[in-house]
Image (cartoon, coloured by chain):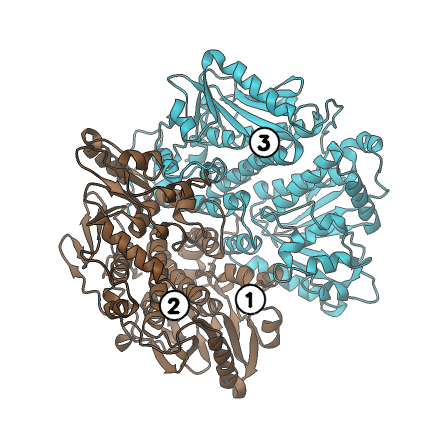
Chain colours: A brown, B cyan
Amino acid sequence: MATTDSRSAPVLFETDPARYKHWKLAFDGPVATLSMDVQEDAGLRPDYRLKLNSYDLGVDIELADAIQRLRFEHPEVHAVVVTSLKERIFCAGANIFMLRGSSHAWKVNFCKFTNETRLAMEDASANSGLKFIAALNGICAGGGYELALACDEILLVDDSNSAVSLPETPLLGVLPGTGGLTRVVDKRRVRRDLADVFGTLAEGIKGKRAVEWRLVDATHPASKFKQAVAERAAALAAASDRPASGPGVTLGPLGVKETAAGLEYSSVSVSLDRAKRVATVVVRAPDAPVPDKIPAILEAGDQFWPFRVFRELDDAILRLRLNEPEIGTVVLKSEGDPARVLQADEVLFEQQKHWFVREVIHFIKRTLKRVDLSARSFFAIIEPGNAFAGTLFELVLAADRSYMLNDPERPNTIQLSGMNAGPFPMSNDLTRLQARFYGDPQAPAVALAHEGPFDAAAALDAGLVTFAPDDIDWDDEVRIALEARAALSPDALTGMEANLRFVGPETLETKIFGRLTAWQNWIFQRPNAVGPKGALTAYGSSERAEFDFGRT
Amino acid sequence: MATTDSRSAPVLFETDPARYKHWKLAFDGPVATLSMDVQEDAGLRPDYRLKLNSYDLGVDIELADAIQRLRFEHPEVHAVVVTSLKERIFCAGANIFMLRGSSHAWKVNFCKFTNETRLAMEDASANSGLKFIAALNGICAGGGYELALACDEILLVDDSNSAVSLPETPLLGVLPGTGGLTRVVDKRRVRRDLADVFGTLAEGIKGKRAVEWRLVDATHPASKFKQAVAERAAALAAASDRPASGPGVTLGPLGVKETAAGLEYSSVSVSLDRAKRVATVVVRAPDAPVPDKIPAILEAGDQFWPFRVFRELDDAILRLRLNEPEIGTVVLKSEGDPARVLQADEVLFEQQKHWFVREVIHFIKRTLKRVDLSARSFFAIIEPGNAFAGTLFELVLAADRSYMLNDPERPNTIQLSGMNAGPFPMSNDLTRLQARFYGDPQAPAVALAHEGPFDAAAALDAGLVTFAPDDIDWDDEVRIALEARAALSPDALTGMEANLRFVGPETLETKIFGRLTAWQNWIFQRPNAVGPKGALTAYGSSERAEFDFGRT
């Protein structure tokens, strides 16, 4: 069987509407329409066809890009209608033949990315006044319904054909992999016994019952559907706090250079040591003050340093996830003048109410969440010349551990800012300082009240770094830590990190990435799904699935 | 390789101190000492030896029994010292050779039971005034440390040898399987970066650093250890609200009869249809009023119906889990006079402050949680003659679905009581009514305010049952539902149910069973752990583990 393996061709995450193969964007004042129109023969790999608006990672990369551009390039858009250009089909979900031909790691990474994209839609709704209406003009199955669940409202055409369904369990022996089960009971609050029936019914639910069970918000006959959608879109758009008009900020290409050693962006460098399975990511402070007035910030646009550096970091992390599966540890470093980072933080803080700065802050938040959710170990290495202050210090807090050189001969400091106090919550809704000091609720305020930089001894004392070796021990301690990490089972590390990183409260988001994803990953390995007679293997062939009925 | 398979010999869960092989109970006024002294050659299976106080399910069944008896038979005990009789060894954790030789399903069920036992200790501390002190007199590794984590306080002897550790990740390529990671960061609130270091350090942490990192509460030199433990035990005992003296309630044998068709208890019957993979569990109401005054309740003791019926149900569920892996669906039925159940509920409600009744209520709560946490589908079938009222109606609420016959010719009702309003929270701390009506927060109060019984139409209308077919459809609808369920992938059902059953808030308990357990189950299947070159396979042999270093 062909395997869709990440090593066969690197996945690139940059795209733009002119290059979209699967989506069409249309604009009508404050309402945009994002229409799925998947090109069957344009999958990322040639071993499957994307029939019936089914999707693969390539389709979702375009969707993620479209959501991003709506936020940044189209501030005048206040509501987005998500629909399809195919007759009587909204979306058939993730392509099953793609899943069947994919490695376990690919399936897991595919679901993680699609989950992040759905959560970015909910983030736009919750924090940016950009609302989404799913206009289900036909069959809406599996991942198609999960896309609808990520919208604020779901309208379903009422005909004899159109139903919503999660057929994964009855047809494929797996779970809906993109938050479906969690959103059905936790977001839409469908009663759990009805959700149980729904989740086992391959043909799904349509019409009045779909409304009664809360699976959709309303149904309308085909003749009135467009008008009903337009009315709801207008109503949601009217409640938005987005600006009435643009201009927006155009997202230009990142212009990354791929080198033998890794990736070179304007403010981020990635160097790979494949033998040691370590990637070193260096993030650079701006080399001049960032503009502090809105016109100049808008003029800087995608070159505004806080935005640029996190766009680059986001791209780097996504590439590492998909294209460098054997890199187990990411070393996070920074360079430059921390005063420049703190100046940028002040601008973010002062201008946070402006729509563009607000978008930048939420973008940084989402990028930092990608770090939290990456199945790699992160070690922050803090050396003289580092720029780990304020927003960049969030990377140290996101790391599984941090090492800070304590050499009185070579000054080495870190510093906090107001940006560590709230704007970048983790998926569990705690700030990284709150999560770090979960056992000492006073500690975040004490650390934030500290005037000026912390040297290594003070940072260690405040609990802001894990270790602060002196110059005699430094090289050995860091080297041994990296070697020891590289020797451990990558699976056990993934599980351990997924449990230690998210202390305290759980949210819909952490439930999706913790409980639901962990179970889905379990099922994605089980012979009943992926074995020679498993349901995912048998789907679409003449064979019937055969199960080992032992319950586990 | 020998496989420890549940089908080779049925596991029995009843035991008593006279039969303990691995634990010694000693009493000294309000303080009991529960000492681990595992008999190497007395494992449940012959293919491993329980060296160094390592344990298997048999050891944990005795531990669970001891905790239960301390609660019921020894109300005068207010604090329990958990320690070991082995020199310089507290406990080496779950036996690795047992794990290595066990089927995936066995590993999962073993961890589930040990988790429930640890949580029962925390339940006793939180709700019954019975406190636990882990007196670590030596090496405390893996599951040994997880047992300590379930205690209220952890004291560690300070010598050159004794450390606490979670060596699963570095040595075995798996996770600590009994709540260790969650309790380290969420209960003891160890800083996440320190937890990361601790979780990758095979030799563990000892002495002052173990205290500084919050891994233990105190260390004492060997010469002062016993006295320090005694002082802490006395202090914790003094704060208890348990009675100063007994008598307690003796837990007699259940006297279950195993028949060809299943299990016959005094108030519970289990009949197995292995061909259809369905077990039918019938719970019977009492046939006379239960005593309502404390002396008579104490005289009834383990025959007090609310206690007896749930002890029997608990035993039945545990046996189904371990000994009948291919039974996919459990049909829950009841028989008898619902008025008798409601009378018993009134007694529970009126007398809930008495220590024994309090224990009974918490026991019922824990048994209902075992249903929530069982990897089986539960369908409640409600027919004329049923006794689904009050406490027994919790079984309907715990079920994934319910079917209630709606035949005006044959009266068929259900009823709620005050016992549905709070005493039996789920692991997420919601009542089953709150969880059911998560989308309609007023509904529980409305349903509870309803006077008298609900007939099928009223129950359906109130959302208390899933379906209410009439007599023409009844047989077909129930039969088809059971057949359809039996045809689905058991793994997908396990994952789906684990996600739909626990809406809303998460707690330490649901994090352990959801996030942590799901990841552990994933890892327990991965070649890096259990493949021919996996770490669990290689442990203790001359081979070194070889990993596929792809990160997933």
Q: Are marks 3 and 1 in contact (CB under 8 Å)?
A: no
Q: Position of residue B48 (x, y in %)?
A: 45, 28
Q: Please tell me whether residue A478 is drawn above or below residue A13 in the rendered image.
A: above
Q: Residue visible at 26% across and 60% down?
A: A315
Q: Which mark is residue B61?
A: 3
Q: Which mark is residue A201?
A: 1
On what subunit does the disc labeled 3 rest?
Answer: B
- Distance (Cα) linking label 2 and label 1: 19 Å
Near-viewer residue (B147 or A388): A388
Q: Quadrant of residue A404?
A: top left
Q: Please tell me whether residue A245 is drawn above or below residue B145 in the rendered image.
A: below
Callout 3: helix, strand or loop? helix
Q: Please tell me whether residue B73 is drawn above or below residue A22 in the rendered image.
A: above
Q: Callout 1, which amino acid?
A: Leu
Callout 1: helix, strand or loop? loop
Q: Is residue B309 visible?
A: yes
Quarter of the image where the N terminus of chain A is located: bottom left
- Find disc 2 in the rendering and name its residue: A95
Q: Residue visible at 30% across and 29% down?
A: B542
Q: Residues within 10 Å of mark 2 (few under 14, many from 20)?
A: many
Q: Position of residue A299 (x, y in %)?
A: 24, 70
Q: Residue visible at 54% across and 14% down?
A: B227
On what subunit does the disc labeled 1 rest?
Answer: A
Q: Residue visible at 30% across and 70% down?
A: A43
Q: Residues within 10 Å of mark 1 (few under 14, many from 20)?
A: some
Q: Which mark is residue B252?
A: none
Q: Callout 2, which amino acid?
A: Asn
Q: Quadrant of residue A216?
A: bottom right
